[in-house]
Amino acid sequence: MTEKKKILIVDDEEDLRKMLRFRLEATGYDVDEAADGQEGLDRARSNWPDLILLDLMLPKIDGYKVCRMIKFDEKHKHKPIIMFTARAQEKDKMIGKEMGADAYITKPFEAETLLAKIEELLKQ
């Protein structure tokens, strides 16, 4: 049996985290959550997720900084990060890419689009 892939959701909206957790667990993923940037960073470093869903507008540390800190950490830089945010402007997407994000999905989102992107990044 193959081990379940672990996904860390970092978002300050509890309802969204619950909905994503439900959807991802139903698809066969192991899910961890964090409600702010600092907690997200700590969990990314200690729980070794296979992929991180990261909101941009977070309490304590914003998603851009969290992404940058993970991607500049030798032990964790290979982890795929999907920026997951309501900020849909091109400049936001560009900054996300510069910080090392592997993908950028805007809210509101299609669950199928998100699941397909997660699968694609986990196969790489």
Image (cartoon, helix red, strand yellow):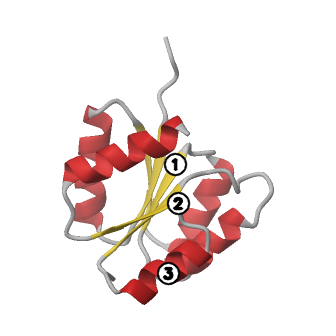
Q: Which circle's residue, 2 or 1, is located before the other in the chain?
A: 1
Q: What residue is disc 3 on?
A: 94
Q: Which circle's residue, 2 or 3, is located before the other in the chain?
A: 3
Q: Amino acid at mark 3?
A: Met
Quadrant assignment for the C terminus: top right
Instruction: Say what secondary structure mark 1 lies in.
Output: strand
Q: On the picture, is 74 further left or further right than 65?
A: right
Picture quarter containing residue 103? bottom left
Q: What residue is disc 2 on?
A: 102
Classify 10 Å Cα crowding around label 3: few (below 14), some (14-19), many (20 and above): few
Q: Amino acid at mark 1?
A: Leu
Picture quarter containing residue 22? top left
Q: Which circle's residue, 1 or 3, is located before the other in the chain?
A: 1
| Furthest-top residue in this view | 1
Instruction: Name the residue at 31% across, 81% down.
Output: 88
Instruction: Say what secondary structure mark 3 lies in.
Output: helix
Instruction: Say what secondary structure mark 2 lies in.
Output: loop
Instruction: Name the residue at 68% across, 64% down.
Output: 71
